[in-house]
Amino acid sequence: MESKKSKNKVRSKVLNRLSVPNVIIVGGTASGKSTVGYQLAKVLELGVVDIDDEIERVAAKPIHEIFRDEGEVGFRDQESAIIKSLTPIRNHVIITGAGAIERDENWETLGRLGPIVWLATPAAEVARRLVMKHDELSKRPLLAEAVRIEDRVEREKYLTAKLDEMMERRRHRYEGAELTLSCSYVTAETCAQFIKSMLLDNKLNDDKAR
């Protein structure tokens, strides 16, 4: 007869650290990567590395000033150096900048660090989030031109088109992620719990080509 103790015993699922040494969050500009990434780290009890924050820490200045002083190539070089330095890291949620995945070497390094999760937030949704946030736009060098557009409707159209263009340029990378989801209409905590569930149940697309 089965004992009451064994009958009531519940085994908690844990992450397979061999297949999930870290979790990598990718996605377009303002897609919710940082918000969801920090929530995911909380529910998985992992550390967090925000690559943009690391770049600013090492450079001792904000990203828009790096773009101003060194151009996009200079910024991308610093971004690649930070990503390369993460090779030994384990037990972290790693949040990338939107364009970090464009360089082959970055994508390959990130892929070795752990499963990649793509937050596929639609461009129109991101444009609606940013259209009236002049301070946020000014901090994003590839979107800062939108601040000059006075008409709100035209500004939103510009942002949507610009975000769509960047998305299409990076789509071949994003589609190589092991997990794709949109969190447009749920809270960051709900999104994080969903990702956690998928990771614990090993419901990742391991056949995705990187």
Image: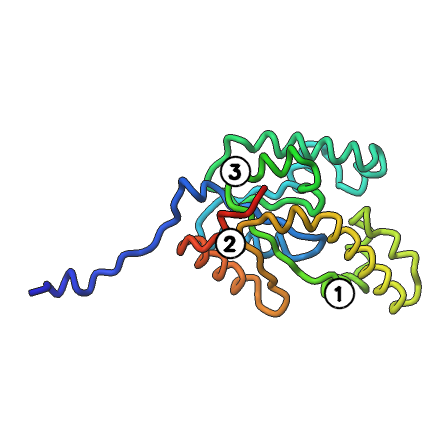
Tag 2: amino acid: Leu
Query: What is the secondary structure assignment of the residue under circle 2?
Result: helix
Give the CA separation, mark 2 to mark 1: 25 Å
Depicted 152 relative to depicted 142: above or below: below
Sequence order check: which comes first, mark 2 or mark 1?
2
Exactly how many numbered labels are in the figure? 3
Residue sitting at 34 percent across and 54 percent down? 13
Residue sitting at 74 percent across and 35 percent down? 76
Tag 1: amino acid: Ala
Tag of residue 76: none
Query: What is the secondary structure assignment of the residue under circle 3?
Result: helix
Q: Quadrant of the C terminus?
A: top right
Q: Is 6 left, or right, of 118 in this rendering? A: left
Tag 3: amino acid: Leu
Sequence order check: which comes first, mark 3 or mark 2?
2
Tag of residue 124: 1
Query: What is the secondary structure assignment of the residue under circle 1?
Result: helix
Residue sitting at 67 percent across and 48 percent down? 172
Sequence order check: which comes first, mark 3 or mark 1?
3
Q: Is 175 left, or right, of 179 in this rendering? A: right
Q: Is 16 left, or right, of 35 in this rendering? A: left
Q: For residue 102, which quarter of the picture?
A: top right
Q: Quadrant of the N terminus?
A: bottom left
Q: Which residue is mark 3?
A: 113
Question: Residue 86 location, x and y as percent?
Answer: 56, 33
Question: Residue 166 location, x and y as percent?
Answer: 77, 51
Give the CA separation, mark 3 to mark 2: 16 Å
Question: Residue 21 location, x and y as percent?
Answer: 45, 40
Tag of residue 40: 2
Question: Residue 39 location, x and y as percent?
Answer: 53, 56
